[in-house]
Image (cartoon, rainbow, N blue to C red):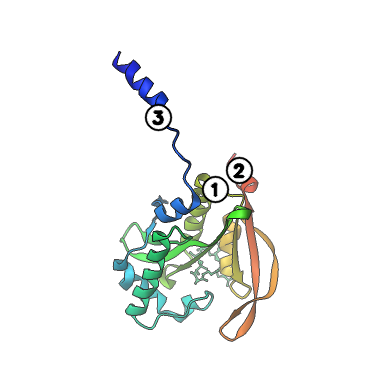
């Protein structure tokens, strides 16, 4: 009898609305990999982030300038918090499980709803380069994105003179699609950029 009543209640409940991309960007769930936790960034990450964001070698191949002070890092983090609050494409903090240190970011640079596509981007503290960590993080973000968002395509770009980033994209199953000549104006010059992409069907084939 009790069972029948709860079944009736279940049948009369309104169907749950599917999550919108905006809800997802606001929620940005925790993602776990063998060595990393990807979680929303917090203001308390500022000292860890400043420790690497002040490094010119890290900033060399990204669009942001090396941070000059921890206050600049706090302002940068506030910008990311604004994106969560407003359901805009944003970034996860990359946290090393072993130490709890925040060692980088990875996330969505843009979202094109009509094309069902996102662009992803990332950066990592120099001490941790060459250990396969960004490959681990990007693989998890690609999986998470295709699983949760009904997207058709994930793309990523890197400056032509940053082949390590292209290697990460290749190791994550992305396809090199070509060079965009002088596509980005950065630090006083038009710079060539390499375009990479992975389609849902590429990802599904790799996961069969
Ligand atoms: C690019 C970056 C994300 C790579 O992260 P990472 O954790 O060191 O990457 P991984 O260890 O997973 O893989 C790096 C790969 O690049 C290769 N690599 C390193 N330097 C290279 C170079 N100069 N040329 C070609 N390949 C290179 C490594 O050998 C490795 O490939 P392998 O596993 O086949 O040996 C990191 O160096 C970084 O954050 N750089 C500064 C910011 C940045 O460039 N962000 C990306 C902007 S598009």
Q: Check disc 1 and report the residue beneath it.
A: 146
Label 1 – label 2 distance at C-alpha: 9 Å
Quarter occupied by the N terminus: top left
Element at label 1? helix
Label 2 – label 3 distance at C-alpha: 33 Å
- Give the left or right position of residue 17, taking residue 201 as reference: left
User: Looking at the rendered structure, which numbered label has been put on residue 13?
Assistant: 3
Q: Are marks 1 and 3 in contact (CB under 8 Å)?
A: no
x, y percentage for residue 7? Answer: 37, 20
Q: Name the residue: 47% across, 57% down.
A: 137
Q: Quadrant of residue 9?
A: top left
Q: Name the residue: 32% across, 71% down.
A: 46
x, y percentage for residue 127? Answer: 41, 71
Label 1 – label 3 distance at C-alpha: 28 Å
Q: Are marks 2 and 3 in contact (CB under 8 Å)?
A: no
Of tags 2 and 3, which is closer to the observer? 3
**Residue that extends furthest to the bottom in the rendered view of this protein:** 188
- Give the left or right position of residue 179, taking residue 90 as reference: right
Element at label 2? helix
Q: How many residues crowd mark 2 within 10 Å: few (<14), some (14–19), many (20+)?
A: few
x, y percentage for residue 80? Answer: 41, 66
User: Looking at the rendered structure, which numbered label has been put on residue 125?
Assistant: none
Q: Earlier in the sequence, mark 2 or mark 3?
A: 3
Q: From the viewer's side, name the closer residue of 145 and 23.
A: 23
Q: Check disc 2 and report the residue beneath it.
A: 204
């Amino acid at each position: 009898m009790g069972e029948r009543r709860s079944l009736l209640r279940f049948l009369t409940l309104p169907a749950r609305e599917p999550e919108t991309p905006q809800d997802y960007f606001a929620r940005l769930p925790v993602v776990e990999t063998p060595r990393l936790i990807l979680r929303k960034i917090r203001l308390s990450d500022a000292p860890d982030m400043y420790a690497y964001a002040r490094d010119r070698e890290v900033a060399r191949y990204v669009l942001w300038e090396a941070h000059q002070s921890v206050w600049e890092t706090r302002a940068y983090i506030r910008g990311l918090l604004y994106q969560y609050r407003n359901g805009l494409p944003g970034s996860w903090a990359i946290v090393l499980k072993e130490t709890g240190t925040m060692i980088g970011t990875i996330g969505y640079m843009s979202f094109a709803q009509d094309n069902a596509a996102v662009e992803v981007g990332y950066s990592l503290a120099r001490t941790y380069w060459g250990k396969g960590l960004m490959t681990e993080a990007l693989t998890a973000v690609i999986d998470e994105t295709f699983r949760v968002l009904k997207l058709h395509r994930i793309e990523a770009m890197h400056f032509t003179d940053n082949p390590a980033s292209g290697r990460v994209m290749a190791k994550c199953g992305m396809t090199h699609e070509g060079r965009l000549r002088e596509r980005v104006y950065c630090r006083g010059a038009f710079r060539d950029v390499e375009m990479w992409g992975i389609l849902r069907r590429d990802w599904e084939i790799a996961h069969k």
